[in-house]
Image: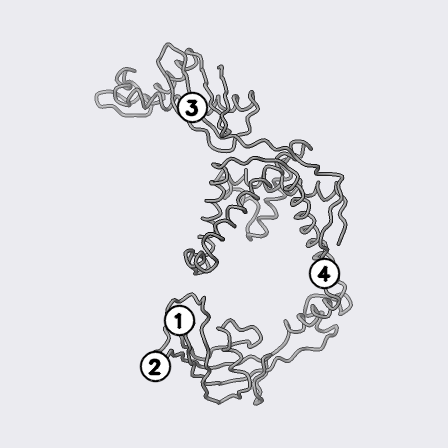
Amino acid sequence: MTNTVTIDEKNIANIDMTIASDVAKEAYERTLRAYGNNINIAGFRKGKAPSHIVEKYVGIERIKADVIDRLFQNEFPKVISENKLNIAFTPEIKSYDFNLGSDLKINVAVELKPEVKLGQYKDTEITYDEFKNAPDELDRQLKLAQKRYSTLENTDEKATNEDTVVFDFVGYVGEEKIDHGEGQNYTLDLANSNFIPGFAEGLVGHTKGEEFTIDVTFPDDYHEEKLKGAKAQFKITLHEVKKRILPELNDELAKKAGKENLEAMKEDIKKYLENMEKTQNDRIKSEAVFEKLLETTQIDVQESMLNREYEAIVEETKMTITRQGGNYEELLEKEGKEQTLEKFKQEALKRIKNSLIIERISLDEDIKVNNQDMMNHINQMSMMYGMSPNQLFEELRKNPNSFAAISQQITANKVNEFLLEHNKFIAK
């Protein structure tokens, strides 16, 4: 096989591949035999029809298309390797010239990744905004542990914003009932209310057995159009007020939490806080080093590449909003269409540049992913998904692209570790 490659101003490689006539002919005859062995043609036993009959039945152009597809899949990786092409997207066969007895000529176009001129990425000083736990964070975590093992007891006292209440409610806008705006024996933790603003506050100060009305105003950005900014009333029947009784902070509580004693629980929380602090600072350092690299690295990202990533972000956003019960068009209206779409475009550009920087560093530093890396990552994923590594592996095999995605993630993690290790970070 011979090939010539020319690259245009849009970073598209136009490739003329020439495959020798004997190779093309042998592939054609092999494909023709395969068709003949697997199809039924009236008047002939399976696999016994003459070649010219099979050609007429299947169609010469269809056979040629299969041959070209197979030969292209075999030969194109060699073109990439020989010419050191860093392709960005799926290659496209633009045309071909296939006549038996002559060389097979295929013209291919493929988009290439842009050149990356890295700025200095190691042995540099980088400042970052250091994260530190609050001085009273240990006490706060201990109080959360108390709350986790607390109990609720009925009281005749007035409800406070720390209590839990059980009540019936019916909502109205004017004289009209609000659709789905009623409930019976509803339990609400007043300290963690998911009702509209003013609702939980309206329950504070009342005692069990009371019947009263709460006046509220729906937010202007409420998801239901006819309720946006509407003034409403909720008729309430309060059945129970429950106070949260916290257990004592002692060894008994620690044992409920699975620790040997209170001191062991405190040490465990301290270790957790230290790990959280380190994780947060590693993330901040990573963001800082990549921000610096984005400023100092030269990459001219072509429009086609940017548009694909931009469209991917738009689709991701639509899917996320739909899962959350929202509306994409309402999001654009709320946050400003031009501003939001420009934000998506900048995010797309940042994603592409970060990905190319990671790829370039991994090549320059010979950072590779081995089988053990893959298995370790799959083991971690399996624990997260609650399935065995073998089960997850079989699921991943159904989509071969998933392994490429995992490999990219591992490479990104390794490059990130390299950057953290080979730079000096100075906390502000």
Q: Earlier in the sequence, mark 4 or mark 1?
A: 1
Query: Dot 1: what SS?
Result: helix
Q: Is residue 238 above or below residue 284?
A: below
Give the residue type that dot 1 points to. Answer: Leu
The residue sitting at 45% across, 73% down in the picture is 218
Location of mark 1 (residue):
227
State how far apart marks 3 and 2 are (Cα): 72 Å
Q: Which is nearer the eye, 85 or 400?
A: 85
Which label lies toward us, 4 or 2?
A: 2
Location of mark 4 (residue):
273
Give the residue type that dot 3 points to. Answer: Arg
Q: Which is nearer the eye, 152 or 212?
A: 212
Query: Dot 2: what SS?
Result: loop
Which label lies toward us, 4 or 3?
A: 4
Q: Which mark is residue 70?
A: 3
Give the residue type that dot 4 points to. Answer: Leu
Q: Which mark is residue 425?
A: none
Q: Position of residue 70 (x, y in %)?
A: 42, 23
